[in-house]
Amino acid sequence: MAKSWNKTNIAVQYLMWSSLLIFTYFVSGIIFGGNHIWMSLTIQLSTILATYCFIYITKCKKIGVGFLYVIFPLLVLLIMPLFFFNDALKFTWIYLLTVPFFFMLTWFLYPRKKIAHLIIFVLPVIFSFYLFPNVLTYINNLNPKTGSEFPEIKFTDINKRSFKVDRDKIVLLDFWSTKCGICYKKFPDLEKLFLKYHGNKNVQIYSVHVPYPYDDFQKTKSMVINLGYKFPTIFAVSKNETLNKLNFNAFPHYVIIKNNKIEYSGFLQIQDNLIVGNAEKEIDKLLLMKN
């Protein structure tokens, strides 16, 4: 009986370890609103701490056992969406790569000197704030229609009058939809960008609302006004026309035009640590180029 109880006790302990990272993953998603940069940092640090605690408390020396109970359930959870969503890998690769990496690194460094333990806590910062956003932007920007002429797309202004983009200037268009939560979170970045180039007559920046069938123009207009941003908003007339002609299917999506040519099409950021798809660098590069 005692032997059976011990086995049950061990099973309960292992179940606790296996659910720890899953719980952390969901809680971090709620706290950070799906921001994968902060989520990945949280999960990487949690993987390190969970591995340390697992080894220290259980005295387990078999890496296979540790892998099975500490990180395997989370990896299964992360792999499952890959079978149902085509673009799931864009966000899950950082976890599928770093969780096993930090588990194994922590396992092998556990008996080593303390300085090695300090170094391991620096790596998640590099992975999350430098590697992840650059690779994510690169993945989102594969196969852009750059170099081609900007197609004829019907736009209206906020008063529903026909609007044409000035094709002789550098124009940044931020395409978004009302169902895109991250689009709203990116508006402050667009505002900073707009304010930086507002005095430059050669640069124009617009947010472009792309309508879904259930969208009501007046409600969207009122929402845009209430948001209170200084950057102007224009409205695409047709979702299908916009997505088909510009060849994208996810929001937010950014297009930069110069002299009626698409110079950039994809995902943009404004962080200084971003090498790929840095909005300011892309605009400044075009400003330096001769017509």
Image (cartoon, helix red, strand yellow):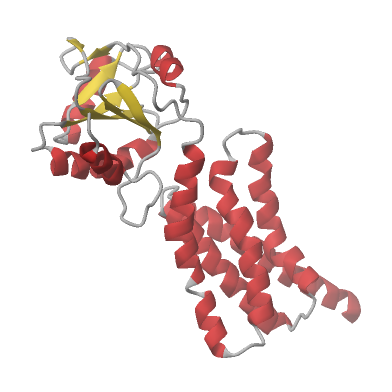
Q: How many marks?
A: 0
In the figure, is residue 177 to the left or right of 105? Answer: left
In this rendering, does residue 36 appear at all? no
Residue located at (68% from left, 62% from top): 71
In this rendering, does residue 285 appear at all? yes
In the figure, is residue 263 to the left or right of 78? Answer: left
In the figure, is residue 195 to the left or right of 247? Answer: left
Residue at the left extreme of this rendering: 199
In the picture, residue 251 is in which quadrant?
top left
Between 275 and 236, the residue placed more toward the observer is 275
| Quadrant occupied by the N terminus | bottom right
Residue 77 placement (x, y as % from top left): 66, 49
In the figure, is residue 27 to the left or right of 12? Answer: left
Residue 144 placement (x, y as % from top left): 46, 30
Between 254 and 114, the residue placed more toward the observer is 254
Residue 89 placement (x, y as % from top left): 59, 42
Q: Is residue 216 above or below residue 199?
A: above
Between 81 and 125, the residue placed more toward the observer is 125
Residue at the bottom extreme of this rendering: 113
Residue 102 placement (x, y as % from top left): 61, 68
Q: Is residue 108 above or below residue 274?
A: below
Residue located at (82% from left, 71% from top): 8
| Quadrant occupied by the C terminus | top left
Between 254 and 77, the residue placed more toward the observer is 254
Q: Is residue 273 above or below residue 175?
A: below
Residue located at (42% from left, 55% from top): 31
